[in-house]
Every structure is written in C-alpha cells, then in structure tokens.
Amino acid sequence: MRLCTYFLFWLIGCCYSHAAFSQEDSCRLRISLLTCSPGEELYSLFGHSAIRVVDDSAHTDIVYNYGTFEFDDDFYYNFVRGGDRLQYYLSVSGFRDFMYEYQVFNRSVIEQILSLNCEEKQRLYAALQLNALDANKYYRYDFLFDNCSTRIRDITETNGAPTILFGNILPPDTPSFRNLIHEYLDKGGQYWSKLGIDLLLGSRMDRKVKNEEAMFLPDYLMKGFDSARVNNEPIVKAKNLILRARITPAGERSWVQPGITTLLLLAMVFSLQWIKSPKTRSALRIFDHIFFFTLGAIGWLLLFMWFGTDHALCANNYNLLWAFPIHLPVALIAFRKNKFARFYFGGFCVFYLFLVLVWFLLPQEMNPAFLPIAALAGIRSYERFSKTRK
C-alpha cells in the first residue's frame, strides 16, 4: 500500500514536471521590432521595419519582412498604375541574412524586445506564420496606410497585445503627411525627388496626420512602441542598437537645386525680353512653343495620375492650375495673330497673375520651385498677348 502511494506521488510529480516543462518550453519565444535607419537611395530613404522572432526551443532566429516586392520588367508600370497591380508580400529570412544587407549598405539597426506574455507571443507568432503562407503573403501596397510599418503595428495590436495603448508621438504643431515626407527628403538631400513627389501628389497629402497614422514611417513606429503600454506597463522591455552604421564624411550638396534652377530660368527669359533683336525674338518664340507645350504635357500627366491610376493621393492636385493641359495643343496651333490667341493669352495672363498672388493661400502646399514657373507663364502669356494685339 505504501509502495503504491509513493508510486502515485511520483507519477503526479512527473506529470506536473512535464507540464511545467512543456509550458516553459512553449514560451521560449522572443519577439522584437527591428527598425533600420534610412539609406541613401530614394526607395530606402524612409527607413524600414521588420519583426524578429527567436525560438529557443526550435533553435531558429527568423525575420518577418512586409516590405518585399518582386522587381521585374513590369514593376515600374505596376508602380505607376498602383492598386492591385502593386503587390508587396511578407517574406521570411534568417536573421543573419537580413542583417547582412544592412552591414553592406552601412545602415544602423535598432531592436526593441517586446514584453508579451506567453499566450500573446504564441498568438502573434502564429499570425505571422499564417500571413507568410503563399495564399496570404501578398497585399496591396499603400505608402501611407498599408506598408511594412503599418502592417507590424496592426498585427501587434490585433494578435500580440489587443490592449496596447500608444502615447502621443507627434510634435505640438501637428504635421501633415507631406511635412513628414519632406523631413526625410530634406535630410537626404533628395531635392529633385521632393519636387517630383510634390508635383504628383495632391492636396490629400496636406491633411494633418493622426498619432497612429504617423507610424507609417519606421522611425515613428519605433517611437510609438517606445510610448506604448499594456496594462499600464511598457510594451518594450529592452532596446538595443544591434548594428551601428559607420560614420562617413558628408558629401557636398549640389547647388543645382529646383528652386535655384527655376529662378535662374525666370531671370534669364525675363532679361532676354528687353533685347530687341530678330534672333532674340525668334529664340523666345521657339522657347514659348516648348515652354507651353511642356506645361500642357505635365498637365496631362497629372490628369492621368488622378483619373488613370489607383493612387488616391494623386487626386485633387492643384498643380493643374499652373500646368494647364490645354496648353499642349495651343502651343502647336495658336501662336498666330488672331482673336483666339489674343483672348487665350490675355485671359491666362490675368489668371497667372492672380495665381501668383494667392499662391500661399491654396489648400495644397505647393513646392516653392513651381512659383517662378507660374510667374514665367504669366509673363510669357502677356508677351504672346501683346504680339497678337499688334
């Protein structure tokens, strides 16, 4: 009888030890957020985010990366058209392979280890594994609202820590989406890229950003997790710089910038108007053909990006006020001395004057480099009007 009692206690102890071991073993997960510093190229200028999962029981160290895309012959076409054509996907790679790229391109990586309980870790890990399946890994990319950073924010809120509360990460003067993007473009010296972005993206970019919306940028996602709390406890239990970029001397910034270039163009053409010679008048006439044709072509491009693509941010673009699409056919056929040309250029002379006066009151933040272009369009419209009147 005593032997049976000992055996029973031994059996219960073994089962308890095995259950405790199994529970401990199942929680040997470490999940962290990786934030990679901006690179030099435009596609990497805003940084990058990924999730690292270390499973000690399975001896794996894996990175889940939502910022992967297939670069093929149709990539640029699909990027321009947007919508379902622009497919990004969740890729899975070893931690060492992931880090090798950032070592090569000299970019820092910061790790934030998340303080999650066993159930939350398992749920988040299972969601990542489910997302990584071929049937689920592709998603419709959106630069502001659905990218490598917002996906991490959303999956952590939904599966990892449903009670997560993010603190305020915005400055007192709440920025717009355009302001946030300009911050990175200016730091990276990407002035011409900034010009192109300001040209193509319309007034929706000038909406004030909300706190969690700012986390579309990896740096702001990192700030968001630094501020986040679950059950009144910080969600980040440790933060480490796991790769420090080497300090390299800053290169000299080129003085050939958009604002300087358009100002010089305005000054040069305005000066040539006072030179009364047949060659100068002929050159200015050719310039007017090219100039108004280019403005019209830009206008048609903006209309195509607005109505011909799925990029919602290209809608409501006030750059169409100075890049008027009808300038394109007019530049080819309406430079003769007739009533239509007089009416057309006289009307646009007044219109461009008014546009310059209200430039900074428009509901869209216009790139300053476009202001000299609008002024030049007004000046040349007046000159064409004067020629037709004579």
Image (tube, rainbow, N blue to C red):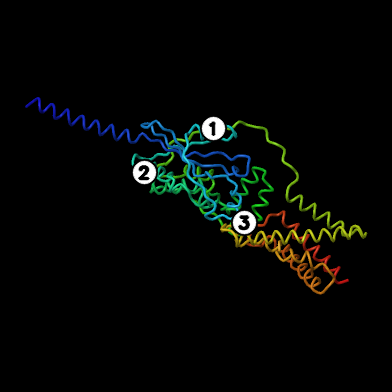
Label 1, label 3: how far apart the Cα atoms are = 34 Å
Check disc 3 and report its element: helix, strand or loop: loop
Q: Disc 1 marks which residue?
A: 100
Q: Nearer the viewer, residue 294 or 228?
A: 294
Q: What numbered label is drawn on residue 123?
A: 2
Q: Is residue 27 left or right of residue 102?
A: left
Q: Residue furthest left?
A: 1
Residue closest to the eye, 227 or 263: 263
Q: In 3D space, how far apart are the residues under numbered discs 2 and 1 (Cα atoms)?
A: 29 Å
Instruction: Indicate left or right for 347 with 53 as reference.
Output: right
N-terminal-most mark, 1 or 3: 1
The residue located at (65%, 45%) in the rendering is 186
Which numbered disc, 2 or 1, marks the residue closer to the eye?
1
- Coordinates of residue 116 in the picture (x, y in percent): 38, 40
Q: Residue at x 76, y 66 (%)?
A: 330
Identify the image quadrant of residue 72. Answer: top right
Task: Judge whether 42 appears above or below 348 on screen.
Answer: above
> Closer to the N terminus: mark 2 or mark 3?
2
Q: What residue sits right under mark 3 in the picture?
A: 201
**Where is residue 368 drawn, in percent x and y?**
70, 54
Give the residue type at disc 2.
Arg
Question: Residue 196's spot in the image, x, y percent?
Answer: 67, 52
Residue 371, relative to residue 336: is it above or below? above
